[in-house]
Image (cartoon, rainbow, N blue to C red):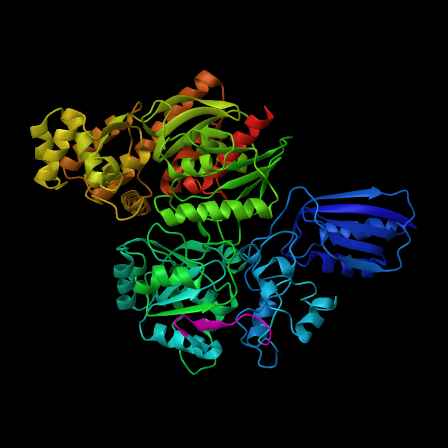
Amino acid sequence: MALYQSKIFGIVQGVGFRPFVARLAARFHILGSVCNKGPYVEVFAQGSDEAVRDFLTAIQAEPPERASILKLTRERLQQEENYQDFQIIESAKERGSIFVSPDIATCDKCRAELFDPQDKRYLHPFINCTACGPRLTILDSMPYDRERTSMGEFPMCPSCQAEYDSPATRRYDAQPVCCNECGPEVYLIGQEDVRGAAAITRTRQVIIGGGIVAIKGIGGFHLCCDATNDQAVNRLRQLKHRPVKPFAIMARDMDTVRRECCVEDGQEEILTGHQKPILLLKRKATGQIVDSTAPGNPKIGIMLPYAPLHMLLFAYPDGLTMPDTLIMTSGNPAGAPICRDDEGALAALKGFCDLMLSHNRKIRIRADDTVMDWLEGKPYMIRRSRGYAPLPFMLHNDWQGAVLGIGGELKNTFCVGRDNIFYPSPYVGDMSDLRTMQALRETVKRLTELLECQPQIVACDLHPRYNTVTIAKELKLPVFPVQHHYAHILSCMAENDYDQPVIGVAFDGTGYGTDGTIWGGEILQADFTGFQRLNSITPFRQAGGDKASREGWRIAVSLLYDLTGSPEKTQEIAQQLDLCREQDLTAMFFMLDNQVNVIKSTSAGRLFDGVSALLGIRQSSTFEGEASMYLEFAAQKWQDDHKEYLPLLPTGLTTDKLFALLLEKRLTGETPARLAFLFHEGLAQFILEACLAARQTTGLQTVSLSGGVFQNHLLTELVTTKLRQHSFTVLRHSLIPPNDGGICLGQAVAAMHRLNA
């Protein structure tokens, strides 16, 4: 009899891995043990050499569907241990790289039990098994065992305990296992005597009646109303001060999704899989969802129910008929983090809703819904959170140490790095709000503790006045500033596990440059050791401070004034195009003439805003990226309607010349949609020519595209096509957002390289 020791690394906690190994041991007649060590699962396997080999091969080839094995070691031991059986040993802590499972959407088997009147968990809002249920959001510490989760407050009843103890059941060693007798329960905040079935029915009644309900889910509260009720949706918009920013939709089932949206190959698998993100789909004109859910937007963000409570909202045996599409938007005031407990919901959401449905299972870590777009048949991440975070990215580099990338000021996520493994956090939010700053502090503390990682260095943005920089300094660690656009490029390189020098194209709204100006349309030469700025869009003056990021007409006026050199001519054009009020124009001239509240900028995002205003599409934005987004919609529609015709543009077209060309054509009456496409084509041509020039001086053939502007499908596709036609290799994002929600990975990689250099 041979004895082997095997260590299995990866997502092997919270997915029923130890029971799975025990069942395989019985199949292959293996004696020994399996133990959860925290960083890995340890197996001792005793049997014939052939049986042990087949057993370990089966572990790697047939893991539980929610598991992800990154590495499996095997070693034949000399000592003769004499096992009499195969046992699951209680978890034992050990140091090393930890792999924490994200929360997992309710599986089909649990869903079937949920609606089976003969099942003990019939209509139980917290049904789960080894293959599904909460993980990260209920976790206090590792290893993943019940007493170290918020389910530790709910002792199992004898029936649940028997399933938990039996290898023959789907709930063998399932830490959050519970039922109607022993699990958490739902109730109405402020009406705590209304619990269970009565609370769910009352919630359904309010939604059917056109009301708005705050609902506590897996990772926080949602605000919910009927997505087919225009009055309810517009009321929610007024209460949230959110006039046009799209709301997410939850649909009852795939039939409903297909009724409302065009579903491409591969998208159904994402929608119905165990992560269940919000997926941006092209909407059908014949759908029943009201236009006010996403005004003027050709797409809607849609997801399927991923928690038992969601499923019960759509289908409950109380005689009511629910709408089959619901608004399910994050439960938070603008700029604040998603609410996760009753106290926070009462303080922040009471004025937004008619009812609050909560439950008594504590949320330890917030997790907003993941938002995903689709590009060339693949996921294209917009916000990486529930279901995906904190799944790590493993690089091939031989690094050692522990780092923290604190992330960006907008769309903040942070990244914990240990050796060559990097764990991006769930979405935190925008750092302009003190509550979000506090949420960042709390989540950094909890996730570093969960991952048993004490950072030696913290990377942050170069901007001296960012709140993230303040929080980084509070940690009392060496602080390593990383330039914003360099971090963008590194994040794309890291996601693609590419460590050779690249030409980096970093286009976004705002980033503090090494020269103290605002960057945002950058061509860099970059690798892990550093970067060099090779080129940028034409610098322009950005007047009006923070208002310039919301009011694109200010950028248009600045560009016009610099182009004409004449206040009279600028005023004449501004009046002709109805860019702004006369008193606003006078104030702009004063600022520009006297260099008051004016900064030099190469922001591609602001250039998009200025062009959007010039073309009469959006003069200002009520949410980040609005003007740019509607400029893209106009351009995309024009391209869809004119596939056979592509405009010819002169070579050497810098962005100031491109703006002048657009102005000339606008004043002669060309359609804004055609000019919107012309702008995208011209900007793509500029990027190509800049990369060709960079290749000539550097010899580099690989281009990395990153930054929030590359959320724009049309520009991304135009640039990618042109670069590939000229034999460039193009690195793009997929599961890390190109926007500021992804820069934490680049920061962490820069810090880790520095630590090892």
Quadrant, the C terminus: top right
Query: Closer to the camera, 434 or 316?
Result: 434
Residue 272 lies, with reference to residue 465, above or below; the image says below
Tell me the quarter of the picture where residue 213 sits: bottom left
View extreme (top): residue = 697
Tell me if residue 223 can be seen.
yes
**Would residue 305 appear left or right of 510 to someone viewing this image?**
right
**Would residue 735 appear left or right of 189 to someone viewing this image?**
right
Query: Residue at 68% of width from left, 67% of height from top?
Result: 170
Tell me the quarter of the picture where residue 321 sits: bottom left
Query: Residue at 52% of width from left, 68% of height from top?
Result: 308
Q: How many marks?
A: 0
Query: Residue at 67% of width from left, 46% of height from top?
Result: 39
Query: Closer to the camera, 569 or 106?
Result: 106
Residue 689 lies, with reference to residue 374, above or below; the image says above
Q: Position of residue 653 (x, y in %)?
A: 29, 25
For the record, the magenta segment spans 181-191
Residue 182 in magenta?
yes
Tell me if residue 374 can be seen.
no
Q: Position of residue 699 (x, y in %)?
A: 49, 19
**Would residue 352 appear left or right of 320 to someone viewing this image?**
left
Q: Position of residue 149 (x, y in %)?
A: 59, 59
Residue 401 in magenta?
no
Query: Closer to the camera, 250 or 365?
Result: 365
Tell me the quarter of the picture where residue 654 sits: top left
Q: Position of residue 443 (x, y in %)?
A: 49, 48
What main secondary structure does the magenta stretch of the protein show? loop
